[in-house]
Image: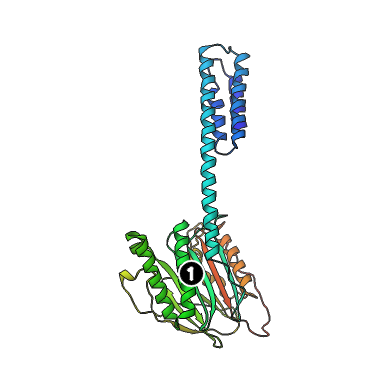
C-alpha cells in the first residue's frame, strides 16, 4: 500500500499542472507504513517519499522555491512522526502479546485437558476461542475420579481476560478439593458457592453483586448406571443414546448461578438420571447454544445431534465444532467449551452418520 500511494503521487504529479502538488501522497506513504511495517521498513518508505519528491522537483518546477521547500519539509516531519508512531505501535503490540501469552499460560495451567480415560469412562474436551489464536476466557471444565465416583464441572465465568482466568482458577481449585472431600454432589455445589462468595468479597462491591459463574455439576457413581446432576443456571446438558436419540437434561428445580447467594438461596438437589452403557453425556457452554447464523437463528445442539451416531466422544466434538463453523459462517461469537463423557458398551459396533449440514 505505501508503494502504491507513492506511485499514485508520481502519476498525479506528472499528469497535472505545476500548481498542483503531490506532496500529500508522499506524506501519506510513511503514515500508512507505520502501523504495519518494521521500523526499518517505515524509515525506508519515508526516505523513498522524500527522495522521489526531490527528483520530481529537480526535473519539474525547481527545488529552490519556497513552496517546494515547504512541501519537502512537510514530508520530512510526517516521516519522523511515522517513525514515532511505528515505535509506539510495536511496543504496544509487544505488551499485548506478552499479556496474552501470560494469560493463556495461566489458563492452560488451571484448565488442563482431562485424560481420555477416567474411571472407566471415555472423555473428550475442547476449548474453542471466539477469536482465532486466543485462549483467554471464562469457560471451564474439570473431571476427577473420586471415592464417590467420577465428578465433573462445566462452567462459564462472567467476563473475559485475566480476571476471568483468576476466577476460573478459584472455581477449579475449589471443585478439585470438594470433589474428594464432600460425600454428596450437593456438598460440592455449596463449597463452590462459598468459594465464589469469598472471591467476590475479596474483589469488592462490584464483583460481589455482579460476579457469577454458571455451572453444571455431575457425579457418575462407580458401578451404577446413573448420573446425578446439579444445574446452577447453565445450559442443559444432553444425553446421547446409543441408538442416536438425544435427550435434553433439564433440572427439576432451576437455581441461581454460583456467586449470587446475596440474591437468595435454595437448597441444591441433585437429579438422578439413568445413564445406560453406550450413551454419551454432552456438556457445553453458551458459546455453543447461542451461536447464531447470518439470519440470527441460534444453534440447536439437540436438534443437530438427534439421530446422529458417533464412534466416540472425540469424533462427536470434532463434528460439532465443524458444524458450528458452518452454521455461523466462520466461527462462534463467544468462547465455547465442550465436554463429552461416554460410557462404553462392550461389543457395541461402531456406527457413524455424518452430521447434517446447515443450508
Q: Is residue 228 left or right of residue 190?
A: right
Quadrant, the N terminus: top right
**Render colour scheme:** rainbow
Q: Position of residue 71 (x, y in %)?
A: 52, 19
279 in relation to 289, above or below: below
For residue 267, say whether it is visible. yes
Residue denoted by label 1: 172
Q: How many other residues sit within 10 Å of disc 1, few (<14), some (14-19) or many (≥20)?
A: many
Q: How many marks?
A: 1
Q: Position of residue 267 (x, y in %)?
A: 35, 79
Secondary structure of the residue carrying tag 1 is: helix
For residue 4, say whether it is visible. no
When asked about the image quadrant of residue 101, the answer is bottom right
Observer-nearest of 293 and 276:
276
Q: Position of residue 263 (x, y in %)?
A: 31, 69
Quadrant, the C terminus: bottom right
When asked about the image quadrant of residue 11, the answer is top right
110 in relation to 29, above or below: below
For the point 55% across and 71% down, which residue is it? 339
Observer-nearest of 271 and 244:
271
Q: Position of residue 320 (x, y in %)?
A: 58, 67
Amino acid at each position: 500500500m505505501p508503494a502504491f500511494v507513492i506511485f499514485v503521487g508520481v502519476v498525479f504529479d506528472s499528469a497535472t499542472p505545476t500548481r498542483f502538488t503531490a506532496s500529500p501522497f508522499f506524506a501519506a506513504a510513511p503514515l500508512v507504513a507505520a502501523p504495519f511495517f518494521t521500523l526499518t521498513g517505515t524509515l525506508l518508505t519515508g526516505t523513498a517519499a522524500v527522495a522521489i519528491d526531490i527528483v520530481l522537483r529537480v526535473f519539474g518546477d525547481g527545488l529552490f522555491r519556497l513552496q517546494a521547500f515547504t512541501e519537502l519539509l512537510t514530508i520530512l516531519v510526517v516521516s519522523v512522526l511515522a517513525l514515532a508512531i511505528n515505535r509506539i505501535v510495536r511496543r504496544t503490540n509487544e505488551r499485548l502479546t506478552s499479556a496474552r501469552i501470560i494469560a493463556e499460560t495461566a489458563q492452560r495451567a488451571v484448565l488442563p485437558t482431562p485424560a481420555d480415560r477416567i474411571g472407566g469412562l471415555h472423555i473428550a474436551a475442547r476449548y474453542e476461542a471466539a477469536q482465532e489464536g486466543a485462549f483467554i476466557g471464562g469457560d471451564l471444565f474439570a473431571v476427577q475420579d473420586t471415592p464417590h465416583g467420577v465428578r465433573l464441572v462445566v462452567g462459564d465465568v462472567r467476563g473475559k481476560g485475566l480476571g476471568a482466568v483468576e476466577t476460573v482458577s478459584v472455581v477449579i481449585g475449589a471443585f478439585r478439593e470438594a470433589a474428594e472431600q464432600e460425600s454428596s454432589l450437593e456438598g460440592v455445589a455449596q463449597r463452590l458457592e462459598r468459594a465464589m462468595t469469598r472471591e467476590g468479597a475479596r474483589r469488592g462491591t462490584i464483583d460481589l453483586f455482579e460476579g457469577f459463574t454458571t455451572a453444571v455439576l455431575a457425579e457418575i457413581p462407580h458401578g451404577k448406571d446413573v448420573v446425578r446432576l446439579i444445574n446452577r443456571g447453565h445450559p442443559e446438558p444432553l444425553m446421547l443414546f446409543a441408538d442416536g436419540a438425544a435427550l435434553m437434561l433439564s433440572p427439576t428445580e432451576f437455581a441461581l448461578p454460583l456467586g449470587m447467594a446475596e440474591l437468595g438461596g435454595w437448597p441444591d438437589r441433585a437429579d438422578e438420571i439413568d445413564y445406560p452403557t453406550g450413551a454419551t453425556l454432552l456438556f457445553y457452554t453458551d458459546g455453543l447454544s447461542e451461536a447464531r447464523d447470518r439470519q440470527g437463528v441460534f444453534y440447536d445442539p439437540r436438534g443437530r445431534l438427534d439421530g446422529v451416531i458417533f464412534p466416540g466422544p472425540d469424533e462427536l466434538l470434532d463434528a460439532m465444532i465443524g458444524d458450528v463453523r458452518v452454521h455461523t459462517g466462520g466461527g462462534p461469537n463467544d468462547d465455547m467449551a465442550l465436554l463429552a463423557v461416554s460410557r462404553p458398551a462392550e461389543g457395541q459396533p461402531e456406527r457413524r452418520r455424518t452430521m447434517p449440514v446447515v443450508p
